[in-house]
Amino acid sequence: ARMLHSSYNRAPRRKLIPNLFSSILQVIADSEQPLTEPEIVAAISRRMNRNDEELKRQITVGLQDALITGYLRVKNLRYSVVSSRLEQLHNHGGSTSSG
C-alpha cells in the first residue's frame, strides 16, 4: 500500500499557545537590552511554567512572524522591539496623528 496518508496522520492540528506572540513581544520589550532566542525561550518558559519542544518551536515561529510583520528587528542574532510598531499595537484607539 502506498503511504498516501502518512503526512496527513502525522500532523494533527496544533494547539497554538494562547497569547504567545504578545508574551514574546512583552519579554523583549521588558528587557533592557536585545535578547537572543535562547534567552527569550528561557524567559517565556518561566512565565508560562512550561519548557517543552512545542513551546520552543512556537517561539521560533513567533519570532519569525514578528520579524516579517515588523514588530521585531534582529541584529547579531539578538532580537529587539521596533518601538513604533509596538505603539501602534497599543494605541489601536483614536490617535489620529499623521507622522
Image: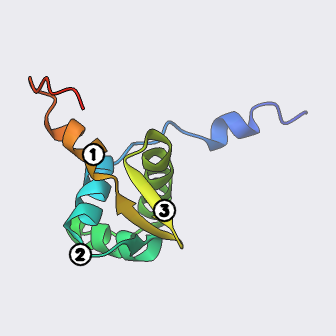
Q: Earlier in the sequence, mark 3 or mark 1?
A: 3
Q: Position of residue 32 (x, y in %)?
A: 23, 75
Q: Position of residue 2 (x, y in %)?
A: 90, 33
Q: Quadrant of the N terminus?
A: top right
Q: Position of residue 46 (x, y in %)?
A: 24, 73
- Closer-to-camera residue (32/43): 32
**Where 25 sits versus 68, above or below?**
below
Q: Earlier in the sequence, mark 3 or mark 2?
A: 2
Which quadrant of the view contains residue 24?
bottom left
Amino acid at circle 1: Ser
Question: In what element is the residue under mark 1?
Answer: helix
Q: CA distance from mark 1 to mark 2?
A: 17 Å
Which quadrant of the view contains residue 7?
top right
Q: Quadrant of the C terminus?
A: top left
Q: Residue at x 84, y 36 (%)?
A: 3
Q: Residue furthest left?
A: 94
Q: Is 30 situated left or right of 10 in this image?
A: left
- Closer-to-camera residue (30/85): 85
Q: Residue at x 49, y 58 (%)?
A: 60
Q: Residue furthest front?
A: 99
The residue where tag 1 is placed is 84
Which mark, residue 74?
Answer: 3
Q: Position of residue 16 (x, y in %)?
A: 38, 43
Classify mark 2: residues with Cα within 10 Å, few (<14), some (14-19) or many (20+): few
Classify mark 3: residues with Cα within 10 Å, few (<14), some (14-19) or many (20+): some
Which mark, residue 32?
Answer: 2
Tell me how the rendering is colored: rainbow
Residue 74: in sight, yes or no? Answer: yes
Amino acid at circle 3: Val
Amino acid at circle 2: Glu
**Where 95 sits versus 46, above or below?**
above
Question: In what element is the residue under mark 2?
Answer: loop
